[in-house]
Amino acid sequence: MDWRISAFTLLCLVLSGVGAITVSMPKAEYEYARGDNITLPCTIQTSGDLKGGVITWYAEGIEDNPKEVLILTHYAYATRTDITQPYEGRVSIDIDLSKGQANLKLSSITLADNKKFECRAQIPGDDEGKRVARTRLVVLVAPSTPICNVQGKQEYGQNINLTCKSEEGSPPPTYKWETRDVRNMPRMQDPRTTTKGGIMSLYNISKDTSGYYICTSTNKIRSASCNITLAVMPPSMNIGSTAGIIGGVVAALIVLIIVIYCCCCRKKKQDEEYAMGVREEEYHDKETPRNGENRHADGQEDDPGYDDSSVRRPAERSDRHEERSERSYNPRSDYDDRRSDYDDRRSDYNDRRSDYDDRRSDYSDRRDRHERYDDERRYDDRRDRRYDDDRYDDRYDEPYDDRERDRPPVPNNKPPRRDYDDD
């Protein structure tokens, strides 16, 4: 009885395997670097004839609600393969019916090939079993340098977000934030700070929130980072208003300096004109004849180089001024007249300067002659005193006997000298 049950079970197992198809792939996930040429294997086991079968490959995205895309269809009975347009030129199928292989070949894979792939087989007369096999292709791409930004105002009491995002990276990178203080020293994050998907949220920021924030994007290939410098200021001290105030102050200072310079130049010019006019009046006062003296006495009119235009010029300038006031006002003409007056006063000043130099030269000559005369007189006086002294000394150098000889004789009736010591 037992052997009958065993025989029946074996017969059922054999009958169940007849007409069953199995499609399989060795691995559920394959990883390749971007730009590689790869092969995705597919094995078909069937009791039917593969030469009359149809083999198809599909691709399906990894996002939510993906769309299935046909890659190619191979007709074994006709030895023909139809490839869809998006994959033309870089997709082929490697068929070996004796081994039941229908491998898909992809060349120069890109990040767009980061999908799920399906291998399907349809064999006439063999509809039972597993006709589909799936695998996942992971295209390895290093994360690009992330972009860091600040969302919100960097002012006291505000809530802001620091964002960090790499444009590409496969597998999708993970993000990690690190914070440092203004002295570039590591510090602990505020307990209220939250981090999710590369976004760091900061609440009720203050001066202590200022510092450096570093975001690192990492996957299994390598990592990249970016940083943000956060400067939290009072609401009234933001960068835009501060820059505007500084610019306004600088502009005001420049305008003030220009105005002061123009005023100083104008005042200096007026002072020079006033000084020229005063000197001119003093000069004419000095040149006016006094006590019956005139220029004939000094011989100035006889001097061929003498020019009396300086005397006539004030009257000429007065007439010119009256004429200018009678004419209609013309700025250019007025400027030319003032310039001409200034040149005339300058010429008068040069003439007076020349006369002054001549008189100074004459004074110097007279002074030199006077000094030489005083030196000669002092020399003559010293010489006369030495001569008189010599004569006085000679008188005392005469011999004693000669002085006795010149003394007058003693009178005869002179009483004799009396010696009082004897008494």
Image (cartoon, rainbow, N blue to C red):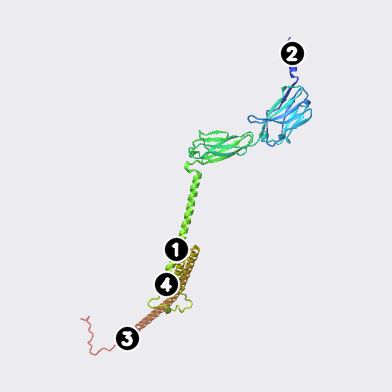
**Residue 234 seen anywhere in this rendered image of the structure:** no
Q: Evaluate whether residue 377 shows in this view.
A: yes
* First in residue order: circle 2 vs circle 4: 2
User: Which quadrant of the rendered structure holds the N terminus?
Assistant: top right
User: At 78% from the left edge and 31% from the top edge, which residue is drawn?
Assistant: 80
Residue 275: quarter of image: bottom left
Could you give the CA–CA distance between mark 2 and mark 1, rounded to whole angstroms? 136 Å
- Nearest to viewer (mark 2 / mark 4): 4
- Label 1: how many Cα within 10 Å (few below 14, some 14–19, many 20+): few
Q: Are marks 2 and 1 in contact (CB under 8 Å)?
A: no
Going by the numbered disc 1, the residue's amino acid type is Gln
Q: Quick one: which residue is furthest to the top in this view?
A: 1
Of badges 2 and 1, nearer the viewer stands 1
Residue 83 horizontal side relative to residue 307, left or right: right
Q: Earlier in the sequence, mark 3 or mark 1?
A: 1
Q: Is residue 411 left or right of residue 8?
A: left
Measure how far apart labels 2 and 4 are at the Cα level: 156 Å
Q: Is residue 58 above or below residue 404?
A: above
Q: Give the residue at mark 3.
A: 403
Return the residue at label 4.
Answer: 284
The mark nearer the N terminus, 2 or 1, is 2
Q: Which residue is mark 2?
A: 8
